Image (spheres, grey):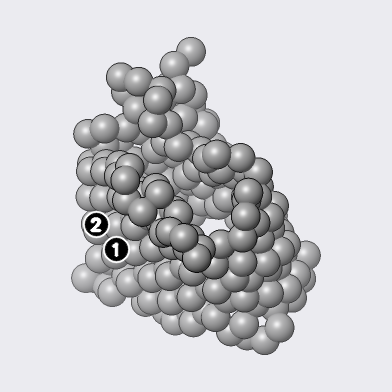
Amino acid sequence: MRAEYTLLILFFLSKELNAQQLSYTPDLVAGHRSLMYLHNVNYYFNNKVKINNLTLFDTEYRSDKANIFFIRNTFSYNVSRKVTLNVAVGMKNPGSFFSISAQYRIVQPIYSFAYSLGATYQKGVTLEQSVALEYFPYLNENLQVYFNLLAIANINLEEYQRGLQYVRLGLKENKLAYGLALNADQFNNGRKILLNTGIFIKHNF
């Protein structure tokens, strides 16, 4: 079975999670270069402690040479309402990694903002920074504009090792968002750049 069919099955066979402490958010992008599946699964032990699984597969239609994978499992502890400490282990191109970070987060009814700073070890140590922004103002009672930006950068003393910028712009109806997508991935000082533009669909379960 081709990888893109597997990703479609993962997305469309997802079912609603009823437990309040568990959330699942799949995001599917059908682009001009590749098909991307991303999900966030959160399990809340209480208002202080949670674990998260972030999984991403990006597979090209014509070749497997530039496929991207990212799997990260994170343990988080809320120091305060806005500050969280994180410890994570996972795998990504080109292998396994370990990271520690702190995150500052603001959540409001129509927007959220998060900035993270930490260190990641994967065949050497890199400084990792990330910014996540969501903005969803209301057009009417049931329809919202949806804007999402995720930017991550890993740098060390020698190079801009890895970076990405993912942008979503569209509409949101209750827990479903859909519209236009842009994914940009950079590797090794930008010597390798992958772009993918298309449409996305995202659901919060």
138 displayed left or right of 80: left
Residue 140 figure quarter: bottom left
Residue at far top of view = 1
Q: Which residue is mark 2?
A: 170
- Relative to residue 118, is residue 54 depicted above or below? above
The residue lying at 41 percent from left, 23 percent from top is 64
Helix, strand or loop at label 2? It is: strand
The residue under the point 52% across, 47% down is 39
Counting from the top left corner in percent of width and height, residue 17 is at: 62, 48
Q: Is residue 195 left or right of residue 125?
A: left
User: Reading the chain from its start, which is encountered first: label 1 or label 2?
Assistant: 1
Disc number for residue 146? 1
Pick the front one: 182 or 187 = 187
Percent from the top left, x then y, of residue 123? 63, 49
Q: In this rendering, is residue 43 above or below 191?
A: below
Picture quadrant of residue 8? top left
Q: Are marks 1 and 2 in contact (CB under 8 Å)?
A: yes
Q: Is residue 50 visible?
A: yes
**Residue at horizontal 67%, vertical 86%?**
80
Estimate the spatial distance between the alpha carbons at disc 1 and disc 2, rounded to whole Å: 5 Å
Look at the picture and state if 23 lies above or below 69. Answer: below
One can see residue 142 in this view: no
- Graded by Cα atoms within 10 Å as few (under 14), some (14 to 19) or many (20 or more), the crowding at tag 2 reads some
